[in-house]
Amino acid sequence: MNLENIRVVLIETSHPGNIGATARAMKNMGLKELVLVNPKYFPHDNATERAGGADDILANALIVDDLKTAIADCELVMGTSARERSLPWPSCDPRQAAEKISPVSHQANVALVFGRERTGLFNEELHVCHWHIIIPTNSEYSSLNLAAAVQVICYELRMTDMITIPLQEQFEWATADEMQAFYCELEKVLTHIKFYKPELPRQLLPRMQRLFNRARLEKNEMTLLRGIFAKILRTTVNY
């Protein structure tokens, strides 16, 4: 496990105290990189108070306008949410997530994405994630404080870091930014051959995203598929 390659991403956090408490949870477990997507209040004294000495993480926190920017250079993206979705996403618990993250973190950037305090992640935000992390809480009271959820997952990362896991074979994976460009081309081709109809989407594109996210494309595989797309567009009549 390389904890320095793992970032925590908070989306539109409304209470600055939760940002500070998140920084404290991260520092407790050895994580350093915090990215804030359009926070409501930051910097803020309450964030500093709740950080409990993790001021360096707050000082170095990166503030961005959208999730796409926050995860652009990441090759593995994990989204956290207590809610199941109508279109189920590949899911795991925090311990399983740590096991998946460990070998990837030695060679690439990993993002742990946390949603808003009240509403969590929107569906389109979860769709850019490879995995949906679900913390197995009491079904009668499943709501976790944001910083508590960060602490649980960072703890599992720390525990996995303390044991030896054999490294997987080294691959060069497509980044989140590259995958979004790939999905734009996929939509263009599917629309052109009339397999995808924007007026009747029927969750086709999210399902295709789920399929390729689950597969995790290597860069050369993505290049191969994009070459096939280009060939289809060049050889299709009237394009």
Image (cartoon, rainbow, N blue to C red):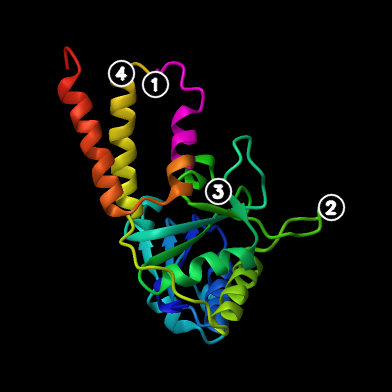
Magenta stretch contains residue 147: no
Residue at which label 3 appears: 121
Q: Is residue 34 in view?
A: no
Relative image position of residue 221 (x, y in whole percent): 30, 48
Q: Which mark's residue is nearer the viewer, 2 or 1?
A: 1
Residue at which label 1 appears: 196
Q: Which of the two labelled residues, at mark 3 and mark 1, occupies the earlier sequence position?
A: 3
Dividing the picture into quadrants, the one containing residue 51 is: bottom right
Q: Residues within 10 Å of mark 3 (few under 14, many from 20)?
A: many
Q: Residues within 10 Å of mark 4 (few under 14, many from 20)?
A: some
Q: Amino acid at mark 3?
A: Leu
At x 19%, y 29%, the residue is 231
Front residue of this view, candidates 129 and 225: 225
Residue at which label 4 appears: 193
Q: Which of the two labelled residues, at mark 2 and mark 1, occupies the earlier sequence position?
A: 2
Dividing the picture into quadrants, the one containing residue 173 is: bottom left
Q: Amino acid at mark 1?
A: Tyr
Give the spatial CA distance, label 3 vs label 1: 26 Å
Magenta stretch contains residue 198: yes
The segment highlighted magenta reads: 197-210
Q: Which mark is residue 140?
A: 2
At x 44%, y 35%, the residue is 208
